[in-house]
Amino acid sequence: MTNAELSTEQHAAPPLRWRELWLKEDWWAIWLGLGIVIVAYGFFANGGSIKWIAVTPPKWSDFSQLGAHFGANYLRYFAQFALWLAVFTVALTALGHRARDFLPSFVLLYALAIVIFAVGQWDKANSYNIEPPLLALAVGLVLSNLVGLPRWLDAGFRVEFYIKTGIVLLGATLPLTLIIWAGPVAILQASIVSLITFFVIYFVGVKLGLDKRLAATLGAGGAVCGVSAAIAISGAVGGKKEDAPIAITTVIIWAVLMIFVLPFAARALNLPAGVGGAWIGTSEFADAAGFAAAQTYGDLAAQGAVAGTSDQAVFAYTLIKVVGRDVWIGIWAFVLAVVATTRWDRDETGRKPDAAEIWWRFPKFVIGFLAASLLVTLATRGYSLGDYNKTVVPSLVAPIKDLRSWAFIFCFLSIGLTTRFRELASAGKKPFLAFSAGAIVNVIVGLLLSAVVFASHWEHLTR
Amino acid sequence: MAGRCRGCRHFRNDAKYLETMFKGLTSLSSAYGSVRSDDGICQRHGRYLRASASCGDFEAG
């Protein structure tokens, strides 16, 4: 669609307010994620389980095993595909997408996800350093940048929607008591790093001659939650329309680089899983990119390549990134909007921001994450540890975790499939330098806090 | 809401339009998320703004 065509369409949409309950993907991630958790609990409470539909490829060593598995379970995969297709179609149609665009795109995505999942379960995958999140990302990048896919296929590559749905499902596997216990340290660590990173990028940017709004947009992109923070802050401070694409390009380049670098750097430093996860949570920029890195590090822990468990890496990452950084975006936006309207452009666009903006910009999927955690924590509070591991884990928690893994694979593939480097806006040297200064400081301070100051806390997470 | 960008003919904030204008936005984010609120582009001034902002060039949409 060209800009000329776009300009003939309807202009500004009316205020969303509570219509965001069905017009924002955050809420749809909650409805889908919590819906799955509630249904899973319903089956569990009646002596059943959703594990039939939460099928995943098993470990295998030769193709005949894999073939036998798919031959015996193709109906389960078909049912799972139909389930995902149905729920995502309902949600995306409500958000304004066309079902007929989504269907072929999701068929391709699901087929690729099965292949990625199966390759990751190969018993030699570890020997070749094949990590499913990285493989998904690499396959997506190759298809979109070297092979080339038609633009209309993007309809099914909804990175944010898949990661938010996966995060809500993740909540069901993370006890609320753990969030309450580890949350304050996560918030403290994330706040220290966020403030330092923001001010480094902002002041280096201003020193290099960047407009303050662009410097703030870049700063938030590096300090809070990547591209999402950049567009939130650019809008809040009234930046030039070119600012957001500059920040998007810069964040994408750094975030994709970090997905590949951070897990292996953490491994080279011999960081335990929880410490590595906390470092990734502090130093990655976007939620989706960070989950790819954290899941990779968790997989390394599961293989015994690093100390700790897969859950420790993913939980530490989630606590730092989601609880420690993401939830503050509304406050960042409000404060910077006040600064912009009272100090930076008193002569230009008027109206001070309303404090209600803090709520409207709040990443609502976090509510779903906490609600899922609360729900499963309350539902399973009467079980002893032995019964929990023997009954609750296989029948309730593990199937939810498997469905979460699917959502994450959809997301990791979609990152690669939608990242077309040639189409990104030119960032320019100065914005890239300013952002890079903050990113480097962020990585160093993040490592210091994760591996030295709070090392014991993260190393023993979940034990 | 007269006077605010939301009601101005120069202001566009539908998610599809923004995802077309902001190249790469869908790679690690989207225009359908809560954090964007209802921000949009002022086509007259080339700014990306809150829908509740305003200026002297307001023209009812």
Image (cartoon, grey):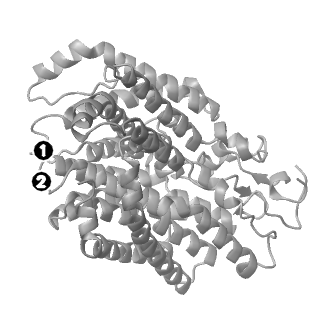
Badge 1 element:
loop
x and y, in percent, of residue A142 in the image:
33, 44
Q: Residue at x 40, y 55 (%)?
A: A179
The quarter of the image holding the C terminus of chain A is bottom left
**Of labels 2 and 1, the one closer to you:** 2
Quick one: label 2 or label 1, which is nearer the N terminus?
1
Tag of residue A126: 1
Residue A178 drawn at (x, y percent)? 36, 54
Q: Is residue A462 above or below residue A60?
A: below
Give, as a three-letter code, the residue at label 1: Asn
Q: Residue at x 44, y 28 (%)?
A: A106
Q: Nearer the viewer, residue A46 or A231?
A: A46
C-beta proximity under 8 Å, tags 2 and 1: yes
Q: Is residue B13 left or right of residue A46?
A: right
Side (left or right) of A165 relative to A59 = right
Seen from the viewer's position, the closer of residues A146 and A96 is: A96
Q: Which quarter of the rendering shows the N terminus of chain A?
A: top right
Q: Label 2, on which residue?
A: A305
Q: In which chain is the residue bearing label 2?
A: A
Q: Mark 2 belongs to which amino acid? A: Ala
Please tell me whether mark 2 sits on a helix, a strand or a loop: loop
